[in-house]
Image: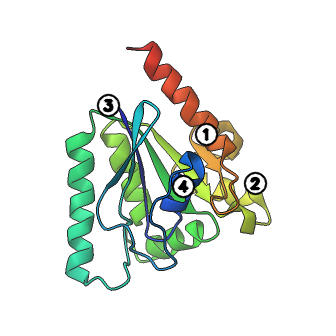
Amino acid sequence: MKEIIFVGRSNVGKSTLIRALTGRKIPIGRRPGITKKPLQIPYHEVMVTDMPGLGFMSGTSDEGMEAIKDNIVHYIEENAGKIMLAVMVINATSFSEIVDRWTLRNEIPVEVELFEFLHELNIDVIVAANKMDKVRDEDKVLDGIGERLGMAPPWRQWLDAIVPVSAKKGDVEGLKEIIRKKLEAVRKNK
């Protein structure tokens, strides 16, 4: 069975987004780190996998967080052949600031590293820019996200790679449509 994984930092809304897309009740919480291991949900003809978040997890030691990160990497590497799509969920309101802060310290930001890692494994990636309901200048924010991931502006030329969403508000139609098209393409190639 083909798989769609939802990946990203802790507390960016991966589980909420899956709930909005599938209508399935899955655990969500206000504090980061509710999802500690991959949670799989059968959905139509694919498996949707809610991956633990990268970064801070409430009530988890540094060693525990590092172990979870290693588990995420191993899971993706071991299952790359059946992962038809990775939805990398980011917080659109803080993504650019976080990436810039890491870059100033001469460190590779987690999201950029994850984005490149998925591409190295030939996994198709959609960036779901979540919490867009809190953004004032959509084009400016989405252009900044694209630039930090190596995509030249304007972001609208990347409609199959960057999609604005608001999981809490249920504004996920753009992402649903992209996923539907990817599923159709997979069905045709069987």
Q: In front of the other: label 4 or label 1?
A: 4
Q: What residue would you read off at disc 2?
A: 139
Find numbered disc 3 in the image and state the secondary structure of the residue it sits on.
Answer: loop
Q: Position of residue 48 (x, y in %)?
A: 41, 44
Frontmost of labels 4 and 2 is 4
**Which image quadrant: the N terminus?**
top left
Q: Of the residues under marks 4 and 3, which one precedes in the sequence? A: 3
Q: Do tag 4 and tag 3 residues touch (Cβ < 8 Å)?
A: no
Q: Marks 3/2: CA distance?
A: 37 Å
Q: Amino acid at mark 1?
A: Lys
Amino acid on which the number 4 mark rests in the picture: Arg
Q: Residue at x 27, y 48 (%)?
A: 76
- Which of the 4 image quarters holds residue 4? top left
The kind of secondary structure element at disc 2 is helix
Residue designated by label 4: 19
Q: Which residue ends up furthest to the right in the rendered image? A: 136
* Disc 1 residue crowd, few under 14, some 14–19, many 20+, Cα 10 Å: some
Q: Secondary structure at mark 4?
A: helix
